[in-house]
Amino acid sequence: MRYKNFEELPVWNSAIEFALGLFEFTAKVDFRGVGDLKNQIERAAVSISNNIAEGFERGTKNDLINFLYISKGSAGECRSMLRLCERSVKFSNFRSEISNLIKCEESISKQLNGWIESLKNSEIKGVRFLNDSERAKIRQKKEFDEFDREIKFMVEQAEKERDQQKSSA
């Protein structure tokens, strides 16, 4: 599936939901007196979705991969600070909420990692490099791939029919 803008990306939406959940957590009275931690974790949470968006808008595969790694780093930073909260007596009443935030962040990291790995294996350099010639090559490759799938399916069907004829004979 092709996404036309970053707002359609499932991982970007997950990152936004994570940040909103984190803001609810940091708005609690218990976060009084830990301003630096609150500020840092909120900034890291916003950085996840912002780097996904910036990388997507850059128009090259290499830029996108670079910004996805930065986003993944910010996600790790959030997880580290949540682990700190998890171990702190001050937040002992919120262990379940912290655990849910950590699970959400881990899911985002996995999504980012999967996307990064698929991009590394992609031949497309990015929309900045797409011209009519490159689009034609991509279209032709898709047509060849579809033809190969059809041929493989036909061969499999013929083998099944042959096997059925042998077993009924």
Image (cartoon, grey):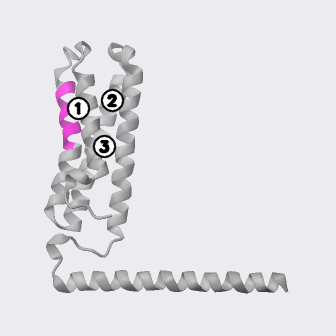
125 left or right, relative to 93: left
| Mark positioned earlier in the residue sequence (1 or 2) | 1
The amino acid type, in three-letter code, at marker 3 is: Ser
Distance between the alpha carbons at the discs numbered 1 and 2: 8 Å
Residue 41, disc: 1
Distance between the alpha carbons at the discs numbered 3 and 1: 17 Å
Is the stretch drawn in magenta largely helix, strand or loop?
A: helix
Residue 125, disc: none
- Quarter holding the N terminus is bottom left
The amino acid type, in three-letter code, at marker 2 is: Leu
The amino acid type, in three-letter code, at marker 1 is: Ile
Circle count: 3
Circle 2/circle 3 CB separation < 8 Å:
no
Q: Quadrant of residue 67?
A: bottom left
x 36%, y 64%: residue: 118
Note whether 114 is above or below 167 in the view shown. above
Q: Quadrant of residue 83?
A: top left
Note whether 5 is above or below 166 in the view shown. above
Instruction: Please give the residue where the numbered disc 3 appears in the rendered image.
Output: 14
Magenta stretch in the rendered image: 37-47
Instruction: Please give the residue where the numbered disc 2 appears in the rendered image.
Output: 82
Q: Secondary structure at mark 1?
A: helix
User: Residue 108: x and y, percent?
Assistant: 34, 45
Circle 1/circle 2 CB separation < 8 Å:
yes
User: Residue 64: x and y, percent?
Assistant: 22, 61
